[in-house]
């Protein structure tokens, strides 16, 4: 059963969440939601109008004013209760992810767990929001700093992590005293409503967390709304740039995390068996629909001749199929996206790359109507061709051969993206040099997917990030608050008054 099927007694209709309960705004625009493993339409999601978005934002602003005044103890108690609710119902959340995104259940459970880590980080709000205090900076004068919430913030999340990405932002924003309007992907919207139920169960006041389903109309309404003070976005680079430019033009604080083309450098001294395991795991998990997926293996001579067969051997052992059947890799999220990725595979062949494993020939463990494309491996890929230059966002792994470490570093640094990278080596000096010289925001050393823990911050460089703050960690706390510095004097009634002084204030 669809976990969001509570709107107007129509289990196939997926609506919004407003004022602490399901809400259907009466829009005449609806979108299809598919089960990617079967290709069947399993739901219809209401696509919000601008007027509906404005109404939800107005409600959130009213609720947010009261929530901002709530004590840190009150906020923390809700966060702890929400953490327990997510933990208790993680299997339901994972099932909702698999039903609409297609990733296998184990991967969906892992997504929920990584989101929970940010919830646990946000539970430390009383410590995270502590200001500083300086006693006696001048005679009888003290200075202290405080951080205050912004008001209503919007979170626009992508289809590939319908639970984890909202949990990167929402718990931190709520811990800081803000109200939130979440706009999930219209491709897999149901998990957002289940999370809304969990916030309500945790005792969050109505209106502090809201969900508006929708497409570009809803996004544009949030970006233009004067009631929205900040926007957090994760998605493709062209859309991230649009969100950043549009939001900042309307005076908002914006963090927009874009796309990626993540390289994994393998040096000649690396453990090739371990590197092959890592390349397959990081390249084909979640069908490659991860912004931190490894899509390019940079093989420094002479390792490619040994490494490519090892990767192909591991691919042969993978089982592609319905994520509810214990398979290793599921389908892509939509038929259109599957066709786009398959087209890029053909473009790679046309460009002269060596197609070692063709995922278009996969025999899936699932229904024929599913959006299937198996793990695909190219060797001898050249920069400047579509299979290298495009952010494919699918199960396609390309091997680029280079002559030296310096060539590998130059290749990574020349790429317009700078989200994640990794190096596999036993040489500590080379690894240390790489972490210093590479122009990428998140670096793994013998770790293929270097997603930071919640108490650090997630974000890339170059075209992978628009804005100056990353997700969660202390960057998240600062993004969702404004700093204020107070200078105070409490005169000593026994001391003489200082009198009038037109000179510039000095600390004495």
Image (cartoon, rainbow, N blue to C red):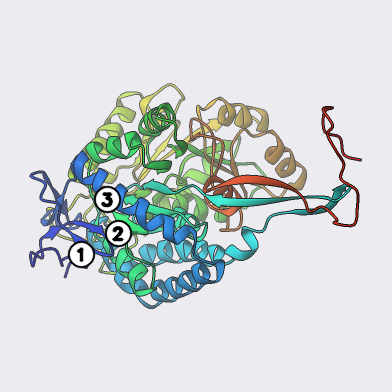
**223 or 135, nearer to the observer:** 135
State the separation of the CA atoms marked 3 and 1: 18 Å
Side of 394 where 82 appears, left or right:
right
At 48% across and 35% down in the image, what residue appears?
A: 464
**Residue 487 x/y as whole percent:** 74, 46
Q: Which residue is mark 2?
A: 192
State the separation of the CA atoms marked 3 and 2: 15 Å
Residue 225 sits above or below residue 284 on the image? above
Q: Which residue is mark 3?
A: 56
**Residue 216 x/y as whole percent:** 25, 36
Asked whether disc 2 touches disc 1, contact meaning CB atoms under 8 Å apart, the reply is yes
Looking at the rendering, in which quadrant would you find the C terminus? top right
Q: Which element is circle 2 on?
A: helix
**Residue 478 x/y as whole percent:** 58, 47
Q: Which residue is mark 1?
A: 4
State which tag comes first along the sequence, 3 or 2.
3
Residue 346 sits above or below residue 180 on the image? above
């Amino acid at each position: 059963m669809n976990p969001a099927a509570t709107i107007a007694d129509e289990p196939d209709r997926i609506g919004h969440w407003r004022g602490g309960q399901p809400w259907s705004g009466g829009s005449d625009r609806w979108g299809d939601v598919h089960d990617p493993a079967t290709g069947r339409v399993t739901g219809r999601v209401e696509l919000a109008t601008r007027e509906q978005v404005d109404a939800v934002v107005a409600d959130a602003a009213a609720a947010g004013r009261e929530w901002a005044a709530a004590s840190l103890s009150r906020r923390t108690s809700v966060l702890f209760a929400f953490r327990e609710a997510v933990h208790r119902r993680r299997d339901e959340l994972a099932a909702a992810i698999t039903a609409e995104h297609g990733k296998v259940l184990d991967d969906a459970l892992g997504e929920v767990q990584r989101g929970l880590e940010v919830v646990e980080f946000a539970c430390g709000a009383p410590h995270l929001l502590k200001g500083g205090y300086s006693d006696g900076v001048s005679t009888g004068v003290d200075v202290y700093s405080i951080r205050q919430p912004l008001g209503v913030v919007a979170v626009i999340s992508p289809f590939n992590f319908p639970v984890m990405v909202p949990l990167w932002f929402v718990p931190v924003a709520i811990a800081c005293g803000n109200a939130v309007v979440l706009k999930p992907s219209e491709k897999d919207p149901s998990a957002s409503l289940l999370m809304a139920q969990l916030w309500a169960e945790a005792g969050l006041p109505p209106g502090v967390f809201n969900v508006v389903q929708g497409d570009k109309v809803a996004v544009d309404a949030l970006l233009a709304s004067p009631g929205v003070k900040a926007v957090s976005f994760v998605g493709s680079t062209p859309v991230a740039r649009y969100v950043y430019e549009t939001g900042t033009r309307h005076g908002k604080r914006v963090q927009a995390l874009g796309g990626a083309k993540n390289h994994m450098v393998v040096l000649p001294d690396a453990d090739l068996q371990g590197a092959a395991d890592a390349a397959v795991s990081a390249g084909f998990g979640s069908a490659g629909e991860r912004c931190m997926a490894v899509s390019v293996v940079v093989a420094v001579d002479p390792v490619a001749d040994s490494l490519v067969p090892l990767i192909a051997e591991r691919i042969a052992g993978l089982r592609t199929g319905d994520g509810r059947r214990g398979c290793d890799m599921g389908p892509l999220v939509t038929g259109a996206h599957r066709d786009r990725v398959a087209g890029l595979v053909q473009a790679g062949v046309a460009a002269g790359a060596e197609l070692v494993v063709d995922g278009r020939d996969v025999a899936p463990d699932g229904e024929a109507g599913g959006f299937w494309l198996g793990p695909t491996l190219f060797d001898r890929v050249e920069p400047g061709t579509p299979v290298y230059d495009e952010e494919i966002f699918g199960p396609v792994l390309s091997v680029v051969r280079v002559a030296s470490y310096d060539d590998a570093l130059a290749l990574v640094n020349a790429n317009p993206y700078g989200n994640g990278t990794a190096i596999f080596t036993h040489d500590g000096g080379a690894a240390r040099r790489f972490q210093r010289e590479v122009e990428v925001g998140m670096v793994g050393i013998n770790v293929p997917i270097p997603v930071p823990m919640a108490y650090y911050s997630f974000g890339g460089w170059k075209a992978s990030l628009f804005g100056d703050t990353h997700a969660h960690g202390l960057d998240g706390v600062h993004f969702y608050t404004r700093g204020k510095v107070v200078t105070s004097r409490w005169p000593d009634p026994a001391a003489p008054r200082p009198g009038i002084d037109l000179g510039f204030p000095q600390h004495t």
